[in-house]
Image (spheres, rainbow, N blue to C red):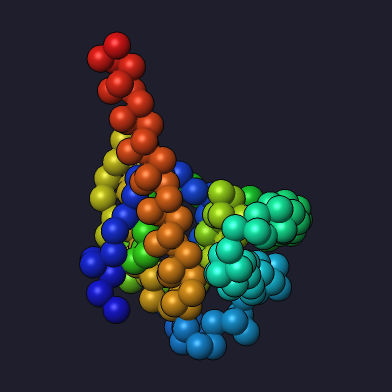
Amino acid sequence: MDTESYFSVTHPLTINIEPLPSDAVIPSADELVAHMPASFQIASEIAQVDANSLRFLNQLGEQTQDLVNYLTLQSRKINMLLCHMMAQDDKAEYRHHTSAFGGGGIRFVHQSPWPLKQVATLKIFLVDEASAVFCYGQVTGCQPAEQGHEIEMNFISIRETDRDLLIKASLHIQSKQLKRRAELRQQEQN
């Protein structure tokens, strides 16, 4: 998959990156579920159920607005529990923060350089989306930066539903950033 065709947004996300040995076998996107932590599997399934439920409710019309509001609140409660469950999979020794992310990969800063083609498991925590993504990435770039080295990793094994989630999250963040910039410009003009 051509990862350069995916949009990337500058934004910090908490991620876990666990380097793997060079002879590690990388599962295909179809086999990825068997390697995922249980909380990531549950979060992914709930996100799909939520998306399908919203489509169904939107088709029912305006009379169901109270029901939609109630179910939205119930969904928020479940999402809070999911965030707590997924936080248990956040391991301090592998924790980093992205400088940018998108549907094709991530960038992060590390104090020392990483070799090109280094493979790692990635746990990407999307707090605003109440979800997380488990996938595999490979180092495709390593450049000196102010606070160490900026490492670029492309996804080499990721489920399409998780890629879609990352794309949605990056567009949501970009929308917030653009709205904030417009507000700041408006304030400067006043």
Quadrant, the N terminus: bottom left
Q: In front here: 77 or 2?
A: 77
Q: In front here: 83 or 77?
A: 77
User: Residue 142 lies in what quarter of the image?
Assistant: bottom left
Q: Is residue 102 above or below residue 31?
A: above
Residue 137 picture location, percent across and down: 42, 69
Toward the front, the furthest residue is 63
Toward the top, the furthest residue is 190
Residue 63 picture location, percent across and down: 65, 59
Q: Is residue 72 above or below residue 47?
A: above
Q: Residue at x 48, y 74 (%)?
A: 161
User: Residue 48 lies in what quarter of the image?
Assistant: bottom right
Q: Residue at x 25, y 14 (%)?
A: 189
Q: In front here: 66 or 126?
A: 66
Taking the image as shown, residue 144 lies to the left or right of residue 100, namely left
Q: In front here: 115 or 74?
A: 74
Taking the image as shown, residue 63 lies to the left or right of residue 26, namely right
Quadrant, the C terminus: top left
Can residue 62 be seen at all in this image of the molecule? yes
Can residue 116 be seen at all in this image of the molecule? no
Residue 60 picture location, percent across and down: 60, 68
Residue 33 picture location, percent across and down: 59, 82
Q: Residue at x 28, y 64 (%)?
A: 6
Total marks in image: 0
